[in-house]
Image (cartoon, grey):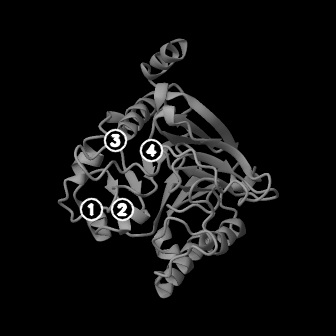
Amino acid sequence: MLQYTLLSFLIGISAVSSENALRFTALGDWGGIPIFPYTSPFQIAVADTMGKVANALGSEFTIALGDNFYETGVKDVNDRRFKDTFENVFTAPSLQKPWYVCAGNHDHKGNITAQLAYTKVSQRWNFPELYYSKRFQIPNSGSSLLLVLIDTVILSGNTDDSTPGNELTDVDQEHADSQLKWIEDTLKTSNDDYIIVGGHYPVWSISEHGPNSRMVSQIRPLLEKYDVTAYFCGHDHNLQHLKENNSSVNYFVIGAGDVVDPSTKHKDDVPPGSLKYHWANILGLGGFGYVEATPQNMTLTLYQAINGKDIYKTVLKPRKKGLV
């Protein structure tokens, strides 16, 4: 009861914080259910709490990390799922800001071009290409953050488990190579203080799907080479933070937007000592991430939906000043 009272106080006031900060939310695997009412109690709880946190602390946009519509994406740009699973669920005024979207494996099972086309229909849905970048200035400063959203299904195939021996062979290698070249060209020209790369499949994860071998072999070297601040993903339905020893890259699984999966079946398949945090409390009704970036540092806080409890916080340093 005390925790709830404190949360009520927090969300009932306007954010009071520095003016030179860029703030935003992130979530993955938030795509409801494929039958009426096309949403789930987990998703509704996450949407409610995310709206309250964004109202209390401020948020300029949301990063959506794929599996936007379960189980088979959308049929066309007029599919009712856009309203029933997105527009009519994330209704808080604080969430009526741009959403920067990428695709998951379930989205590719439907008409993915319809999700791109919805960019011209919705005022907040931004999904112009299967992979794209967006630069944000940190207010009242010379600092910036580069968001690079990629399509991991193009890179790895449409599979639920891409650990060694389980890969599917539906990869168009020419298309994959073209995206890899675009990713490297985008990263190597960046002078931004922070870079966040976002995609659906994990590089590292201890949960049900585990590490994605193609992501490890193709994306991880680029993240390391170009000192990317963090890689955000979903696919596994929980919250995780991993960071390899002697590495500057932080890996965050933020896939608890709809359901929560407590599996740790791949706990021995990540680098030793890399797991910094893991949350998969079904009673927490899902979760999401909240980021505040200033010229001095970038703070990522993970929240569970129930009572809006902040369950984990970590601070990352700017690329130009040495990374955590």
Q: Which residue is mark 1?
A: 74
Q: In this figure, what is the number of numbered marks? A: 4
Q: Residues within 10 Å of mark 3 (few under 14, many from 20)?
A: some
Of all residues, the one furthest to the right in this rendering is 246
Q: Secondary structure at mark 2?
A: loop
Q: Which residue is mark 3?
A: 40
Measured in 3D between alpha carbons, the distance from the residue under mark 3 to the one under mark 4, in whole angstroms, is: 8 Å
Q: Which residue is mark 2?
A: 127
Kind of residue at badge 3: Ser
Location of residue 146 with respect to 96 vertically, above or below: below
Q: Disc 2 vs disc 4: which is toward the camera?
A: 4
Q: Disc 1 vs disc 3: which is toward the camera?
A: 3
Q: Secondary structure at mark 3?
A: loop
Measured in 3D between alpha carbons, the distance from the residue under mark 1 to the one under mark 4, in whole angstroms, is: 20 Å
Q: Earlier in the sequence, mark 1 or mark 4?
A: 1
Q: Disc 1 vs disc 2: which is toward the camera?
A: 1
Q: Is residue 271 toward the left or the right of residue 298 in the image?
A: right
Kind of residue at badge 2: Phe
In-front residue for pair 303/116: 303
Q: Earlier in the sequence, mark 1 or mark 3?
A: 3
Q: Could you say which quadrant of the image residue 211 lies in? A: bottom right
